[in-house]
Amino acid sequence: MKSIRSLIASFWRRPFAVERDILRRLASRYGLRPPSCDAPSFAAGEDVRAPAGILNRSGMIRLAYEFLNGNIMSGDYFEFGCWGGRTFRLAYEHHKIHFQGRMHFWLFDSFQGLPKLDPIDEHPKWKAGDLCTALDDFIRIVGDAGIPACSYTAIAGYYEHTLTAELSANIASKAKAGLVYIDCDLYASTRKVLEFMYPMLQPGTVICFDDFYCFNGSPERGGQLAIREFLGVHRDVRLVDYLNFGWHGKSFIVHLSGSDGAGGT
Ligand SMILES: C[S@@+](CC[C@H](N)C(=O)[O-])C[C@H]1O[C@@H](n2cnc3c(N)ncnc32)[C@H](O)[C@@H]1O
């Protein structure tokens, strides 16, 4: 399957319509999305395999920007769990349509892989140190993709050290969140992220939980547990259901009691 994907991707760069037609047929024969802005060559396997008509990560991020633009909102992009920069590259690419030059990208990762797992986060797929991209490699990858260094701030380190109340207040004094992309897999990490982001939330902030349906979709683990606990502490925050994406993700729109805003089409 991997070689069919790379074959399709390498041919896609060639401009001839007849080749594109062959590629479309090949992709459809193998149940893949043909290379496009919804399935660029660096896309994750589940984004390529997501059946046409099902939103994947790329589509989710694009729609979130449409939501922000349609509601005349502004705000920065925050990503928690950056690994090899795939979602960041999608987020950067799509922001150009409406938000070029008007959005800063805040990126948070250990750049040393997953932390030591608490018992509640044990999972056959993950162990401490997995999913590691060193900061230097990350900077090179996104630089090669044409993303200027001034457009983002990468905060490296485990969240227990980096997601401090001081940093949260400092960022909140200059930025609000437009789109928050949480892709750090674990309950313990997601719980810290939500607490950190609280001061940056505004009515209409879109929050995407990439791992909402991990841990067999259990409400007692992972992102779902972190969300429930967060909402239990912060009674002024409401999360309005927005969109499911892929087999794994779900997004919400933030509302804050006492400070609501409304936009139109
Ligand atoms: C699934 S990967 C992220 C995938 C990424 N969004 C992409 O574009 O491919 C999960 C990431 O979360 C990070 N992570 C998870 N828990 C963390 C924590 N407590 N502190 C710092 N980084 C964490 C890991 O280092 C890893 O890079």
Image (tube, rainbow, N blue to C red):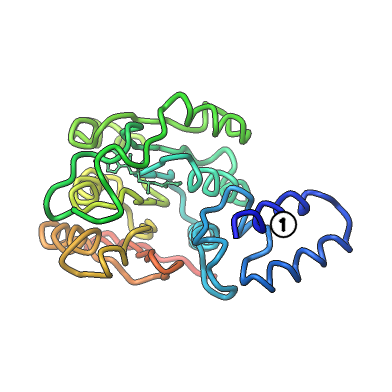
Percent across and percent down for residue 89 are 54, 43
Q: Quadrant of the N terminus?
A: bottom right
Front one among 127 and 74: 127
Left-right relation of 157 to 49: left
Q: Amino acid at mark 1?
A: Ile
- Regarding ligand 1, which quadrant of the image does it lie in? top left
**Residue 169 seen in the current view:** no
Q: Is residue 135 above or below residue 24?
A: above
Seen at 25% across and 64% down, the residue is 215
Residue 10, position as x, y percentages in the image: 74, 49
The residue lying at 61 percent from left, 31 percent from top is: 144
Q: Is residue 217 above or below residue 139?
A: below
Q: Quadrant of residue 19?
A: bottom right
| Callout 1 crowding tier (Cα within 10 Å): few <14, some 14–19, many ≥20 | many
Looking at the rendered structure, the secondary structure element under dot 1 is helix
- State the residue at coordinates (18%, 45%): 117
- Residue at position x 27%, y 59% from top? 259
Residue that badge 1 annotates: 8
Give coordinates of residue 63: x percent, y percent.
52, 63
